[in-house]
Amino acid sequence: MGWGDLGAFGEPSKETPNLDQMAAEGMLFLDFYTANPLCSPSRAALLTGRLPVRNGFYTTNGHARNAYTPQDIVGGIPDSELLLPELLKKAGYTNKIIGKWHLGHRPQFHPLRHGFDEWFGSPNCHFGPYNNRERPNIPVYRDWEMVGRYYEDFKIDLKTGEANLTQLYLQEALDFISKQQASQQPFFLYWAIDATHAPVYASKQFLGTSQRGLYGDAVREIDDSVGKILKHLQQLGISENTFVFFTSDNGAALISAPRQGGSNGPFLCGKQTTFEGGMREPAIAWWPGHIPAGGVSHQLGSVMDLFSTSLSLAGLQPPSDRQIDGIDLLPVILQGKLIDRPIFYYRGNELMAVRAGLYKAHYWTWSNSWEEHGKGIDFCPGQSVAGVTTHTQEEHTYLPLLFHLGRDPGEKYPLSFTSEEYQRAMERISGLVQQHKDTLVPGQPQLNVCDQAVMNWAPPGCEKLGKCLKAPESDPQKCSWPH
Amino acid sequence: MGWGDLGAFGEPSKETPNLDQMAAEGMLFLDFYTANPLCSPSRAALLTGRLPVRNGFYTTNGHARNAYTPQDIVGGIPDSELLLPELLKKAGYTNKIIGKWHLGHRPQFHPLRHGFDEWFGSPNCHFGPYNNRERPNIPVYRDWEMVGRYYEDFKIDLKTGEANLTQLYLQEALDFISKQQASQQPFFLYWAIDATHAPVYASKQFLGTSQRGLYGDAVREIDDSVGKILKHLQQLGISENTFVFFTSDNGAALISAPRQGGSNGPFLCGKQTTFEGGMREPAIAWWPGHIPAGGVSHQLGSVMDLFSTSLSLAGLQPPSDRQIDGIDLLPVILQGKLIDRPIFYYRGNELMAVRAGLYKAHYWTWSNSWEEHGKGIDFCPGQSVAGVTTHTQEEHTYLPLLFHLGRDPGEKYPLSFTSEEYQRAMERISGLVQQHKDTLVPGQPQLNVCDQAVMNWAPPGCEKLGKCLKAPESDPQKCSWPH
């Protein structure tokens, strides 16, 4: 989902009354970022509070390449990483993940081995259908075991876009919340829905209801579901005791637009890029009775802050034996404070850009290669800023491209290198970058090796369902990451 | 000002609390259009309820050229046109224009000859300063006579951007409203401020207060002023008896961005073009006690509708001896109705595009010429949609380029000519265009002839001020309209 997909963020169709209401009752974050311009690394960052380059969710197979966890990925979340649910357990929390995990699908990466108590959802994206020979269909798990596969037992009709998954995820959420409320147990619910990820889907009752096409139908169903979850909290009388945060793991995938891709509002490019459209996210905090209604924050925030903020809410300290990139946002949310901190934009293990205050400096620019672009793979359709949306990797480390995101949210007008403003801003940013690089200890890269043998051929529980498939022989390869 | 310049429309800095509040208390129009992608024709359309091609505010000097009323324009609003204030007089209204007139500056075009009772402002843009030899500085009028000139008596500091004009216009508005309230007279106030038109300006107390630079400072001052006007109406106890509408006469001038130009949100290009960024406008209706608070309308609206709506509010009928393009929006505003009507996008006397429902068909595409573009004149900076943002005038009258603005607000993905959807939509639009063209009676073009002798050399009142200048000899020429 992109920054510009919600009415509260200016989407011209204004079809998200529930999320807009959530914003009106809570706090809107206008300068909130994900940790990476695509899914797996962002989610790993959210759950560890650490940049992907630290927690291992990156590749070194090529320079500045995006990588994630397809079915043949060998890596996943390392045991050495401490995940938010693992830590919350210490405060008596019950933790559930509903939806997409994406932190590795091999047994050692199972979410219930990393702090979650319950799971309903899938380890990978809902790509498919596959023929179960070259590639198995993706499994859906309940807790430790699979309960079926996408396109087989969990239907997604690629022709009409119909799938009832969001409804299943909604019911799971409502039931879990009810159960926790009944047992008076504190809980952490990671509601990781994926209807706006291509192939985009919506339930029958939402199909064709949006001005925006199928993508809009999916957004409307998510909006409706969020409304139902918030209402459920209110009806159970626990809304003033439950902190809710809504955000996304990367900008709208413009390559899938308009039918399957959303809007990044006034920002440049989309998913896969380190321009604002790739990483600035819609973000809303909600906690009636605590967060003043109608608040708007310009705090530079990150999905990694949800790690630190959640620990703070639970009365816990973040781990002190490692670098945590997230900050505790409670002073921002509850007291309207502004904390000065930079935002780092990575692609693979390359620091592409840095934001400090309203300035953003690009150290490297790249959308994707000419070769890919020639095949019609375009992460910036209709947008072309000379020297900025480049199709060769351009190094600017000696003289970074600098933008003022207040005057120029679309990153279209680089500041003059000779201006005083440039000198002043870069002096500050250079210091931040130096400090960041000096102290950086990269994790072991997890997204380098792919192997057809590790795909979801025979997930736990497949025997009961008669859905075990024979894995091919192991053939480890360097994964290919074209962009 | 552009669609994307207000917080309520998703501007990422959210610096317009008063206009956002006006929207929260009133009705937000998300699909509201001006009548032309630049100033004079839009204002003529607003005040006559008629397309510029009917009221004469266009040129035939070149094909599909934008034209306005610079100092040397010979034409202006024809006497045969009936302006909103002329008609409102019949219902006892006192009419005042504050700010930019732009419907011609020669004596016969004076606003007080066309229905206004009072004027404080200027006939042209606040361009300058001039040396009073090749070109005089633009006069500022109070009622029939000039009271000074820009840059001489009304300072605009181009270096700092400081000018207190918006404050003068605000005080004029508050005083006029007070006076009308005291005398129990109904009134029409046309508050035609121009601080967001390059050269952009703001008063000292607003300079440097915006994240968005000087342009943002200007927007903040306008926002603050609107807030003061609405509060004044409330304090006088006449807010429930006063209909207020906020909109703009063209999209943000991206050519002046980022320092002097605003944002068109997710829309394509800006001022001077018939893409959405050139003509879709922020629009808010406010009338406490009548308009339900927090309304959002997808009615296709136009500045010309303000003519018909205002007449309706005053209990008057629109003239029946001529074609009026505006419609009465009261059923939309008060009862939430949706009226099916097309939007026509003109450049000069060429119908460039038509919107019906969510579909928009382009019959001609052009941003500007290669020659101009080569000089750095760019109406679509950073945006380039192959075959759409063309630098030669491209005719598509036989096979219009069709966009679905719900799925694709940015006009980036033309529908396939062979699709059923294309056929179905074009069938409808072709009918509308045929009907429009069949009944169109173009007015006499007013913006063809320019003459240095007609400039503001010696406006009425100049003698008293010792500010009469000698006009050069008359030398009528075809005006040059490059785009």
Image (tube, coloured by chain):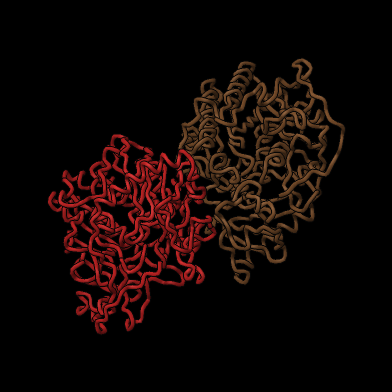
Chain colours: A red, B brown
Could one spot residue B286 in this view of the protein? yes
**B412 to the left or right of A452:** right
The image shows residue B161, relative to residue A14, as above or below, that is above
Residue B114 quadrant: top right
**B353 to the left or right of A409:** right
Residue A376 x %, y %: 51, 69
Could one spot residue A214 in this view of the protein? no
Residue B107 x %, y %: 81, 28
The image shows residue A464, relative to residue A436, as above or below, that is below
Q: At x 52% / y 25%, what residue is drawn?
A: B204
Image quarter where the N terminus of chain A lies is: bottom left
**A459 to the left or right of A39:** left
For the image, the number of numbered tags is 0
Q: At x 63% / y 43%, what residue is drawn?
A: B250
**B308 to the left or right of A133:** right
The image shows residue B184, relative to residue A171, as above or below, that is above
- Closer-to-camera residue (B13/A349): A349
Residue A119 x %, y %: 23, 63
Image quarter where the C terminus of chain A lies is: bottom left
Q: At x 39% / y 48%, what residue is drawn?
A: A19
The image shows residue A222, relative to residue B167, as above or below, that is below
Residue B428 x %, y %: 67, 61
Residue B467 quadrant: top right
- Closer-to-camera residue (A7/A431): A431
- Closer-to-camera residue (B260/B76): B260
